Amino acid sequence: MTRTQNIGTGAIALATLLMMTTALSPAMAQTATPPSPASDKPITLDTLTINAQAAGSLTAPTAEQAREDLNRTPGSVGFVDSESYKGRNAGNLRDVLQDTPGVFVQSRYGQEVRLSVRGSGLARGYHLRGLEVLQDGIPVNLADGSGDFYQIDPLGLRYTEVFRGGNGLAYGSSTLGGAINFVTPTARTAVAPNILRLEGGSYGTARASGQVSRDLGDADFLISGTVTHADGFRQHSRQQGELINGNVGYRFNPDVETRFYVGAYIVDQQLPGALSLGDALHNPTKAAPSAVAGNQSRMTWTERVANRTTVHLDGGQVDVDTWAIHKKLFHPIFQVIDQDGWTYGVAPRYSTSFTVGGMRDDLIVGARAFAGNTTALQFVNVAGSRGAQTANTRQDARNVEAYAENRLFLTPTVALMTGAKVLRNEREFTDKWNPRRDSSQTYAGVNPKIGVLWEPRANVQVFADVTRSQDMPDFGDLTQTQANGRPGFVPLQAQHAWTAEIGTRGDVGRFGWDVTAYRSMLRGEMLQFTTNPDIPAATFNAGRTLHQGIEFGARADVVRDVSGPGAGDKLVLGQVWTFNDFTFRNDRQYGNNTIAGAPEHVLRTTLTYSRPDGFYVTPTVDWVPTGAWADQANTLRAPGYTLLGLQTGVELPNGVLLFVDARNLTNKHYVSDISTVTDARKAGTQIFYPGEGRSVYAGVRATF
């Protein structure tokens, strides 16, 4: 395989078809009234300067507009401005989301992370399940619901929206974890027309990123790209990545706009494999012998084309999203996994505001129809190359969904929110070597939601809601490796949950907070266990399980004018605490044990000193008091750890930012992630991923 497989003629033809279809489609007859100003100010747990923004557009609101709209949600949400992490190394999604309450994100190596919200995909040994990932409001997940993070460029984002649990309904999500929307900039929302960034540091890390945008009146365009190389902390963990994002917008008139998004993403990641607990703690740079012998790696070539067309009239607003994603995967592990597939879909969405009996009412109605197919081949792994072929299958997924969310303001400060999603998902597995083994499974359901939002005073909100979620197994769950080494179809059930949450967020004077307590009662939770460290984990449906916890974020301006009256410098304390309590409920085998995979407490503390001249310094403490259980029998767990870090830099008046990011200053040996097993007394325990050692990164960013 060569990298000439980047953007094929199929992607170009599809892009042309999408452009022709959008250009010829008739203007719709409804539009939305402008959003009303938000009465609350969002919490900011970071003190770095955020540059002034452009006015935004119909298809792409500014960061401030998006944050105001997000904070009108009657439920637990989060917002991350890309400017909040501009002064630190940003190599993967942990660097983007680590200061967001309730988001459990742990690095494994390179861009590979475990991303979980409220225990979504908790025991998943690889990639993503139970959480919908969007880019620019358009799905990134494959049609079967699976996903990874390799195409998300932290340096190519303008902001990130986090919808925990059932609060992702406004985007059509009804999974346990919710949705995360990674939004790229446009020429109308970028912090500057031109951005250049260079950084590097420990373990052979070097990264270059650039962004160019122009507002040409009715038309605008932006293109950004990042090239990354890293030798990696561990042996056999070299990484090379090239990520490109671009968009072009055209405003036909003040009420009609279309925007095309394109992207190409190439990632070549060597896999160091998992280790025993002893090796992870005492020889953390080691690679698993089988990973080296099999030259295990993960190479992906992904192309993305998408369009959003927005029509804005007096009665409401219509957004129509269309997308197509082509992904090729070459993945030598226990065998060589060789896959090629497409995902494509359309999603109309209508939003409006009107008056009912003198009360304001906000309504969102949407639908999504999307599908995908993947040709999945397997071969004997001969030192990372294809040997004899062992499997030839096809995976097809088809989904039709409709959803609605309504917010009725009973008083100017109290809103009642109701909503529901109806869905039908089909999964079909074809074994081309044995047609008699063709299998399929259909999932359907209705997921309601009800909530209330109260604003007792300006900039303060209290909310509560109850939602039902439904997670369908993806093909990583449904196709499991059999005794003969070939994939077989396992007809798993969907995972269902009812979640109740109550919380508050606000910003008063020197203090800001975002606190939510939730309780999810699950049936059929999809859990995984590792039978062999070189074979993908198997999935099973558990009985009744319970997920509950607290998502806590707070910020306080401890001291203002530190160096004297009117100096403008300040000291800001930030605290994030995620409390996870995930247990079985009277399980026949595991009783009321803790579900393996996540530590009970995850805390992060920051203390930032900043001056008006652009200088800042931030010591950080990441603390996991007790590590996660490694097995469902609760006989083996990782130890807790404390990591110390320091970020410092200065932003000069000419738009140049110089920064240094130092991590794990004490060179602590610790476990960052685990692939779970059923019982460590009976199963192999080469399932631990060591965290990165002491590291220092430095960089420069210029905006002009």
Image: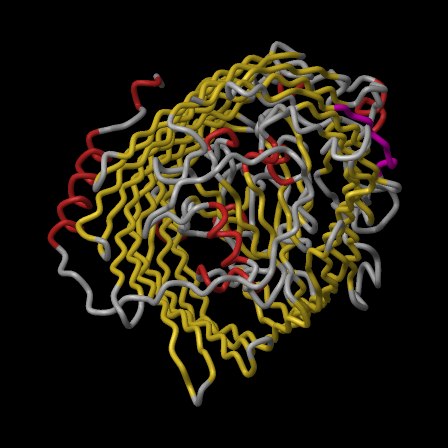
The answer to whether any part of residue 387 appears in the image is no
- Which quadrant holds the C terminus? top left
Q: Picture coordinates of residue 402 (x, y %)?
A: 38, 69
Q: Is residue 640 left or right of residue 611?
A: right
Magenta region, mostly helix, strand or loop?
strand
Residue stretch in magenta:
638-646
Query: Looking at the image, how many numbered discs can be counted on the residues?
Result: 0
Q: Where residue 211 sits: x, y (%)?
A: 40, 25
Residue 339 picture location, percent across and down = 39, 34
Please indicate whether residue 106 sits to the left or right of residue 31 in the image. Answer: right
Residue shown at 64%/73% (left/top)? 454
Considering the image in quadrants, where does the N terminus appear? top left
Rendering quarter of residue 276: top right
- Residue 57 in the magenta stretch? The answer is no
Q: Is residue 532 above or below residue 538?
A: above
The part of the image, by quadrant, that contains residue 358 is bottom left
- Identify the residue shown where x is 61% and y is 16%: 658
Between 520 and 134, which is closer to the camera in this rendering? 134
Left or right of residue 102, residue 667 in this image: right
Residue extending farthest to the left is 24
Q: Would you say residue 644 sits in the magenta stretch?
A: yes
Looking at the image, residue 331 sits to the left or right of residue 628; the answer is left
Above or below, 199 relative to 535: above
Locate residue 65, reporting x and y percent. 46, 52
Foreground of the two, 486 or 631:
631
Using the image as rendered, state which of residue 1 and residue 324 is in the foreground: 324
Question: Which residue is at the far bottom?
Answer: 357
Whether residue 84 is visible here, answered yes or no, is yes
Quarter location, residue 683:
top right
Q: How is the image coloured?
A: secondary structure
Q: Is residue 20 above or below residue 504?
A: above
